[in-house]
Image (tube, coloured by chain):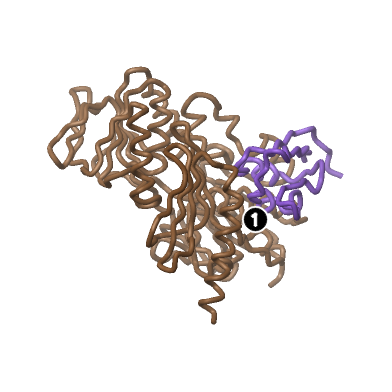
Chain colours: A brown, B purple
Amino acid sequence: MTRPRRVLIVGAGLAGARCAETLRAGGFDGEVVIAGAEPVPPYERPALSKEHLAGDRDAEALELRPRSFWDDAGIELLLGSRVVGFDLGARTGTTERGAQLRWDALVLATGSAPRRLPGWDGPGVHVLRTLADAAELGRELRPGSRLAVVGAGFVGTEVASTAHSLGAEVTLVDLAAVPLERILGAEVGAALASRYRDEGVHLRLGAGVERLERGADGRPSRLVLADGSEVPADAVLVAVGVSPEVDGLPGARDGSIATDACGRTEVPGVYAAGDVAGTWHPLLGRRLRVEHWTSAAGQGAAVAHALLGEEKPFAALPYFWSDQFGLRLQYVGHAESWSTVELAGEPGSFVARYLDARGEPEAALSVNRPGEVGRLRTELAAAAEHRARRLAA
Amino acid sequence: MSTYRITIDRSVCSGFGSCADLAPQAFAVGADGIATALVVETDDPAVLDAAASCPMAAITVEEVGKQEAA
């Protein structure tokens, strides 16, 4: 394949930004264009639920690179430009406003959008994904204001923590019996639940939401749960997960875009990175779609290397972290299911290892034990190699 | 392009290695299991992500100025 002259990156998040700057760092001297739906330069999204919502880091301090970086690097940022149509034959994309963007190589890095509950919108009902969302949610958080958080995943629990620290009265609602159950399991979830309770957060677990009731001003007044009980609320955060933004993207199937280890899709000249990409993981020996910050960065860089003619897949084990209620959670590996969870430590400072049926670890979580994370990663990488060898045999 | 200066607090580093994953040209984990900076200064902004991803917050990256493109 001849080296492309014009690379169009759709999505101005971390994956797209890393792809663009890695191209420049690698000496690419063609055109690099990033088209982003949001009106702001690439920024650090994980802080939205934490430091930024708490008022400790303003929007400008979240930007991934200094303002002048993009111009200096010759990277064109087309902001407020959602690409809605793709013509693979003509190699052009069309933005919402009708602009035509040509490419020799196309990088899909559109990220995720928050799921919503049908009919749950209007004043006082929020999601949190963008800087604009954070600004709106932030206005609701005052000492004494009552925030109901629907969904005890990472966004929900981090916002609960921040809102609580700002003096809001927080109720966390989830259908599951404990917070973060699907990802961290019942044992860890129970430990977290007792931490949240000790901090003074109200937990309404094991009961789905039935409906939202509003006052005469159209704002939320209370949630009614499936068991008939009520949660008074001045504002509501709907934090029921995200969906990858793959609608209409070339190569998308079943909510993701399959790629090889370097981010190439099955469509020639089209690449994908970040939340939308189901990327072959060389160490785990399977395709994996994750929504982790480090994977977005690493996959964006891997696509750039592929465009430069180098095979440099992002082969690190998946890794993510969460800061909440004075706890630092760090998770390494990837376990969709497991046989047993092995806990070591005490509440507030422990390690959980997620073991398969053979007793081998597939993933591990450290809670306030950051010094152990390096050792856990080494152990998990060895177990993954062992597993891959066994499957190949 | 901007120039970034890297400092690692080796007494804090746990050898996790995400710095070397995200910016392999600037970081490596040595035989002692502790990360080292391969360069003192670089114009590669990947080092900012490496610092942000460090589980121990052991990496400091300072923007020390701009160099004019040649």
Closer to us: A97 or B32: B32
Mark 1: few, some, or many residues within 10 Å (few <14, many ≥20)? many
Percent across and percent down for residue A42 are 58, 41
Residue A10 against residue A64 in the figure, above or below: below
Callout 1 secondary element: helix
Residue A98 in view of the camera: no
Horizontal side of A135 relative to B34 (left or right) equals left
The residue lying at 63 percent from left, 63 percent from top is A313
Percent across and percent down for residue A148 are 29, 31
Percent across and percent down for residue A234 are 27, 25
Horizontal side of A175 relative to A273 (left or right) equals left
**Quarter residue A154 falls in:** top left
Residue A343 against residue A267 in the figure, above or below: above
User: Which amino acid, by three-letter code, is at mark 1?
Assistant: Ala
Looking at the image, which residue sits at the far top?
Answer: A143
Percent across and percent down for residue A87 are 50, 64
Closer to us: B69 or A87: B69
Q: Which residue is mark 1?
A: A301
Closer to us: A355 or A92: A355
Quarter that holds the C terminus of chain A: bottom right
Residue A30 in view of the camera: yes
Looking at the image, which residue sits at the far right?
Answer: B70
Looking at the image, which residue sits at the far front?
Answer: A345
Residue A280 against residue A156 in the figure, above or below: below
